[in-house]
Image (tube, rainbow, N blue to C red):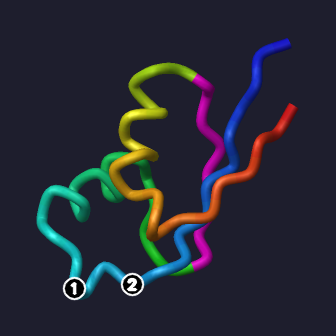
Amino acid sequence: MSKKFQVTLKKSLIACPPTQRLTIKGLGLRKINSSIELADNAANRGQLFKIQHMVEIKVVK
C-alpha cells in the first residue's frame, strides 16, 4: 500500500515569494485550512520541502 500525504495550508501567502505562491497554487491549495492528499513521490516531496514552513503535513496510509 502506498503512502500519501495530507497537506493543509496554515499560513497566508501575503508575504511569500512568487515561486512559493506558484508552488502552493500548483498543489491545489487555495485558502488557509484547505487540505489536499498527495502521493508520496520525489516531485511532491520537493514541492513540500519548498513550502514546509507554511503547511502542516500528515502521513496517511
Residue drawn 77% across and 16% down? Answer: 2
In terms of secondary structure, what is the magenta stretch mainly? strand
Q: Number of numbered discs present?
A: 2
In the depicted structure, whether residue 59 falls above or below residue 31: above
Where is residue 46? Give x, y as percent: 38, 34
Spot the residue most to the top.
1
Q: Residue at x 60, y 36 (%)?
A: 38
Quadrant of the drawing holding the N terminus? top right
Q: Which residue position is annotated with label 1? A: 15
Circle 1: residue type: Ala
- In the rendered view, tell whether residue 5 sits above or below residue 16: above
Question: Residue at 15% of width from left, 69% of height from top?
Answer: 17
> Around disc 1, counting alpha carbons within 10 Å, would you say few (fewer than 14), some (14 to 19), or many (20 or more)?
few
Q: Is residue 59 left or right of residue 47?
A: right
Residue 54 is marked as none
Q: Is residue 46 magenta?
A: no
Residue 22: x and y in percent read: 21, 56
Residue bounds of the magenta highlight: 33-40
Circle 2: is it few (<14), some (14-19), or many (20+) Cα within 10 Å?
A: some
Residue 18 coordinates in the image, percent (x, y): 12, 65
What is the x, y in percent for residue 49? 42, 45
**Amino acid type of disc 2?**
Ser
Are discs 2 and 1 less than 8 Å apart at CB?
Answer: yes
Label 2 vs label 1: CA separation? 8 Å
Helix, strand or loop status at disc 2: loop
Choose between 16 and 32: the one closer to the eye: 16
Where residue 12 is drawn, which disc sits there?
Answer: 2
Q: Report whether 59 appears left or right of 18.
A: right
Task: State left or right for residue 38 relative to residue 28.
Answer: right
